[in-house]
Amino acid sequence: MPGFFITFEGGEGSGKTTQLKALLAHVRTLQGDAVQTHDPGGTAIGNQVRELLLHGDNVRMSALAELFLYEASRAQLVQEVIRPALTAGRIVLCDRFTDSSVAYQGYGRGLDLDLVDRLNAVATGGLRPDLTFLLDLDPVVGLARAARRLAQPSQRRDRLEDERLEFHQRVQAGYRTLAAREPDRVVILDATQGIVELGARIRGYVDRRLRAAENGRATESRAR
Ligand code: TMP
């Protein structure tokens, strides 16, 4: 029985992690062993790669080296966590995935979009999310929210948050373009809505899509 793969995407300070956690609580009422993970990271190896990627000292990292590192972490995450969970029929919620590389390394850094797509396909073995929530937010607002979070003692500023505003504007535009290309998979949500309202909307989408997937499977098995 195939599982169901949901990803959350968005710029800095878009609130996607908060929404992922809220959805996890809901999904666990439906399937107790639903999995939560994040990209980059989510495995012991991936977390070491994440540290390299986000460390503020690594300012001289080339755009291509950066892309390869994200893909390396993702390849490990897919093999070790995501594929096995989906094969076991579990629902997987992932904080960022391949679309982040398209938005940040493709549109943000200006790397060739075909190259990013090809490396995404190789790293994931062609795995694509069933459903993606894009929390769309003006980076001026998002970076201000992220800055407030950084004012808390345990938080550290990461290398990408240090990028200039224009970089984050390209990322937002890139996200909107990729969402427009795949309207069936990517749901764009206005991230200025309240946390509770946004959460209810996301739950609504997920419930509908899970029911549709369930009905599709029932029809398939009757046809067999
Ligand atoms: P996070 O703070 O949401 O965990 O994401 C870490 C940073 O990594 C964030 O600035 C976005 C960036 N990123 C990329 O540039 N490319 C990618 O493929 C991924 C997954 C994240």
Image (cartoon, helix red, strand yellow):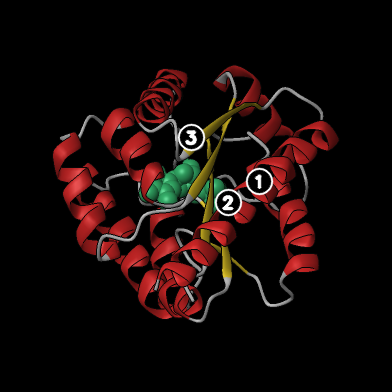
Q: Earlier in the sequence, mark 3 or mark 2?
A: 3
On the question of residue 154 being in view, the answer is no
Q: Are marks 3 and 2 in contact (CB under 8 Å)?
A: no
Q: Which residue is mark 1?
A: 208
Q: Are marks 1 and 3 in contact (CB under 8 Å)?
A: no
Q: Which residue sits at x=73%, y=45%? A: 203
Q: Are marks 2 and 1 in contact (CB under 8 Å)?
A: yes
Q: Which residue is mark 2?
A: 212
> Of discs 3 and 2, which sits in the foreground?
2
Estimate the x, y position of residue 47 in percent, counting from the top left: 47, 70
Kind of residue at badge 3: Asp
Q: Quadrant of residue 111?
A: top left
Disc 2 to disc 1, C-alpha distance: 6 Å
Q: Earlier in the sequence, mark 1 or mark 3?
A: 3
Around disc 2, counting alpha carbons within 10 Å, would you say few (fewer than 14), some (14 to 19), or many (20 or more)?
Answer: few
Around disc 3, counting alpha carbons within 10 Å, would you say few (fewer than 14), some (14 to 19), or many (20 or more)?
Answer: few
Nearer to me, 104 or 199? 199
Give me the disc on residue 19: none
Q: Mark 3 near ligand 1 (CB under 8 Å)? A: no
Q: Mark 2 near ligand 1 (CB under 8 Å)? A: no
SS at mark 2 in the image: helix
* In this view, 133 is above or below 21: above
Nearer to me, 182 or 101? 182
